[in-house]
Amino acid sequence: MAAPCSRMANRPLWRFITNVRRTGLKHTGVRQISLSSACRAATQTRSKTEGVPSPWKLYGAVCLQRLPVISQERNPIEDQFAELMHQMELERSLLSDHEQRLLEDSERMTRKQADNYDSDEEEADYGGQETITAQDQEDTWEQKLKHFQPALRDRDVGGTPLGSVERCLGDSLVLLVQQTVGKETIWLLPQAQWEAGETLRQTAERGLSSLPEADFKATFLGNTPCGVYRYTFPKEVRTERCVGAKVFFFKAFLSAGSASQKEPFLWVKKTELQRYLKPPYLEKVDRFILNL
Amino acid sequence: MFLVLSRQTAVPTNVSSLMGVDGHVSQGPWFASVLTLKTSAPLRAEPKKKKKVDPRREQMVRERLKKKLKKLERVPPELIPIEDFTTPAKYMDETRVRGAPQLPFEESERRALLLKEWSRYKQTQHRAEMEAVGLAVEAQREALEELRLESEELYQAALRPDPLLFPFNHQGPSYTPPKAQYEAPEGKYNNITKVYTQ
């Protein structure tokens, strides 16, 4: 598979680039942090017992997904295989009641049109009733089907805006909002700062409900966070007490909701995430957003 | 003698008034025995005999019934037939067999190659799915590690299972999107499934 190999090759590259680039969200090299995190863990556990707060600010974020509404288009190979399966099943099956009726009716028609047709004999069997042939029934059923107009599958022909929930009905979409973090306004998953006395999941729920002019009803999948993004503040903002921030992500499925078009919301597919999210953030978020 | 005769004629009409007024009967000895017939000693003894024997007989009858019930209960219950496992007789009919088509060589080749292509496609799909799930699990493990470093209390709160999550229901994707304000027509059907009771 091409994708994982390229990711492995790019990892040292990203680290180099992020070290060189000076952005608001700096994700310093993984290796450096991991060495110090071991001793920091020791100090932190000691400090917990002493009652000193940790130097990381905590945030709870929600990864709200709208699951697909319609099935996806078939690949050419899937199309061919479906056809083949249908054909093979048809060949291996027995005749159904309806098909037998069709055969009998056609035989009766041929017998009627033959020269030596004895109508008395035939009608004695059937009691002289007018029978509805199976073909007539099929025709009536087809007529009924034509009266029903299903909704169209592709509505994107008109170009629905990115903020609408009804965008790509065949894919699962993720909600992105624009928030100010530090000095910049960037696109990210909706988050809120953790306050003492609540669990992180409640923080995430608060972050979702506090979005202006939108009410989304979501079912959160459990109490465990699905991912974490840790970053250190730039040197100007860094103090002894807060070195950086950790954002914990929680997964949720959208059950009902609406939002006005004015507010900056985005519903994006997994493939479109890279256009809006910063690379180090995207790297962590991409892992737990499944495109299945 | 004269007195006795007069009292004899008076008895059938005035016996009740005589009883009520006097309280005790002061007539001849043979009247006394007639009136005390109901409460004499030999008559009282007979129902006592019945009481001794009848409860035993009733008990014996009840025990026999219970034994019969136990014998009936020991029989194992009849198994409910699974109707999916028995092919109905009408499908064994030979007139229903479709003519087996004779496939040309190219067609059978094409089918075999397509099946192999399909298995390869499915294998790559499965590998990709497994990888994606592995990454997601790894991400969650890292998140829990970081949370533990932060605070033990939040970590324990995160590990607790959510009782309100299940039963979880979700309507899967359909071929066409749902129509707004569509009223499905009411359908009537007769349910002819056989219900078995043990």
Image (cartoon, coloured by chain):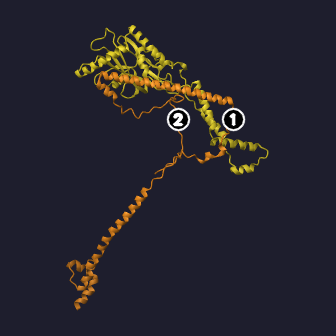
Chain colours: A yellow, B orange
Q: In this view, does B65 lie to the left or right of A134?
A: left
Task: Please say whether residue A133 is visible from this viewpoint.
Answer: no
Q: Which of the two residues, B9 or A38, is positioned nearer the viewer here?
A: A38
Mark 1–mark 2 distance (CA, rounded to whole Å): 45 Å
* Residue A80, x across and y down, in percent: 61, 27
Query: In which quadrant of the rendered view does residue B111 lie?
Result: top right
User: Callout 2, which amino acid?
Assistant: Ala
Q: Is residue A203 left or right of residue B128?
A: left
- Cβ–Cβ below 8 Å for labels 1 and 2? no
The residue that disc 1 covers is B102
The residue that disc 2 covers is B184
Secondary structure under the numbered disc 2 in the rendered image? loop
* Residue B177, x across and y down, in percent: 52, 28
Q: Residue at x 44, y 33 (%)?
A: B169
* Residue B166, x across and y down, in percent: 40, 34
Which chain does the residue under circle 2 lie in?
B
Q: Which of the two residues, A145 or A254, is positioned nearer the viewer here?
A: A254
Mark 1 / mark 2, whichever is N-terminal: 1
